[in-house]
Amino acid sequence: MAMMTMRRAVALGARHIPAAAAASSRVVPLRHMSADAGAAMEKILSAGLLRTQGLIAGKWVDAYDGKTIEVQNPATGEVLANVPCMGSRETSDAIASAHSTFYSWSKLTASERSKALRKWYDLIISHKEELALLMTLEQGKPMKEALGEVNYGASFIEYSAEEAKRIYGDIIPPTLSDRRLLVLKQPVGVVGAITPWNFPLAMITRKVGPALACGCTVVVKPSEFTPLTALAAADLALQAGIPAGALNVVMGNAPEIGDALLQSTQVRKITFTGSTAVGKKLMAGSANTVKKVSLELGGNAPCIVFDDADIDVAVKGSLAAKFRNSGQTCVCANRILVQEGIYEKFATAFIKAVQSLKVGNGLEESTSQGPLINEAAVQKVEKFINDATSKGANVMLGGKRHSLGMSFYEPTVVGNVSNDMLLFREEVFGPVAPLIPFKTVEEAVNMANDTNAGLAAYIFTKSIPRSWRVSESLEYGLVGVNEGVISTEVAPFGGVKQSGLGREGSKYGIDEYLELKYICMGNLG
Ligand code: NAP
């Protein structure tokens, strides 16, 4: 993905562009957009939420060399805006600003930080529609899902505002009678947060909410594909009174920005959501300055349907787990394992449900499946389907590009998938549901665990003993039992094995931004 940055970058040279003029010149005239996109953009503009510059030390800034990147609508290919293509110099300034603000922000009382976060939450909710429209325009997800993401994303800010006041330390019974032993929890410092395009708001708030609640300050790098939602959210943070410098946003040349964050001794933590390959690089790169690291990486979720499952519950749950965001989530069911006794019945009902999905532009109310993020994503899906069919799988539904063109792909069901196929081994990240038959519980658990990933897993069964036994045997960080959508701000989200390190959301997610300090008070008499 990072390579796309440079390909889409437009060199403007080093000439000085006054900030206001530069900002407006980066917004593509509405008359050049389709009617739907133009109307959506007009709403966003009139709410003042189309920000097209980076945010450093509370100021909206261009790339220092004037370079920009186009932000495109994946449903139509139209250019929505141009944003700065920043690199190491802008990132260093953002780090310096976060570092100097850390001393004032971390000294505020928890209640003061909580109030600012609460206000940010309120502003996000009151601009729900404009944020959702932005997300649909730049990412492609249907409006209903985009509105859901605004609520979900905002919930991390609300939860962090509440939890800021509950960051308690400990008093430990001393081993000597003239001593008192205390544990303080203190903010880790400046945080570098790198986020993907598939949840343009929630992957940011899930990191920035707890970081700010603890007293940390942040440099965020959103994906080059979806910077507009990130910038709008940052604007609302400023309006909420989160001080200049506490939240900075840079975007552009991903490896350069990443390296600047990694090399800085002032950045004390890297938190990343994205591909496993980039996560490994960031983990290795953090070693030199021994930073704390949290990684939310790729998944390969099994969804196990047992013979005794309630078929309606299993179909509804698998459909939601597979086709949310057109299959482009890290917790999407990547392999649907179906026990032999229910395979035919499940396949028939599941295919019928998949046929009811409506592919289209996310701005249209009836759409339930938007486009994939870009042409590379479609080519990956095609490669996986070709690999599977060449090894004996059969396409039961879809299996090709959608007649709408662009990066639209037909919701697809593939039968008789086996463990030698790419569809089994890797994350397809598209609207393809592979069905894999199995005989015994043991075989299903072995197949489910036969991967380096360990993020989400789902099981469908009416048996309570089996729910327990299988949940405990699955090498995954999250397990949904008779439920396909399980993420919430109050529960710990994260993976095991190569799906990542650390947790986001819940009280456990707060801990990721804290250091423990032990204080021994001696000679107390
Ligand atoms: P990606 O290519 O790894 O990109 C993620 C972020 O890393 C983007 O901001 C990207 O910037 C940046 N990046 C790329 N190369 C970098 C480098 N060398 N140094 C620093 N930053 C770099 O992943 P993606 O395609 O956007 O996202 C899809 C992946 O994310 C999937 O594997 C999915 O499973 C995973 N994901 C995981 C979770 C979870 O919670 N576990 C949640 C959502 C997604 P540019 O986009 O600007 O190139």
Image (cartoon, rainbow, N blue to C red):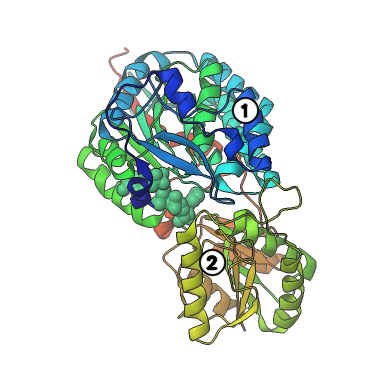
118, above or below 206, in the image:
above
Q: Which residue is mark 1?
A: 124
Task: Say whether mark 2 is within 8 Å of ligand 1.
Answer: no
Spot occupied by residue 235 in the image (x, y as percentages of width and height): 52, 23
Foreground residue among 477 and 126: 126
Spot occupied by residue 524 in the image (x, y as percentages of width and height): 32, 13
Residue furthest to the bottom in view is 392
Per the model, the C-alpha gap separating discs 2 and 1 is 40 Å
Foreground residue among 240 and 44: 44
Task: Say whether mark 1 is within 8 Å of ligand 1.
Answer: no
Inspect the image, locate mark 1, and give the three-letter code of the amino acid beneath it.
Ile
Pointer 2 local density, CA inside 10 Å: few below 14, some 14–19, many at least 20: few
- Of mark 2 and mark 1, the one earlier in the sequence is 1
* Quarter of the figure with the C terminus: top left
Residue furthest to the front in view is 31
Label 2 secondary element: helix
Q: Nearer the viewer, mark 2 or mark 1?
A: 1
- Number of callouts: 2
Q: Which residue is mark 2?
A: 473
242, above or below 33, in the image:
above
Foreground residue among 424 and 136: 136
Q: Are marks 2 and 1 in contact (CB under 8 Å)?
A: no
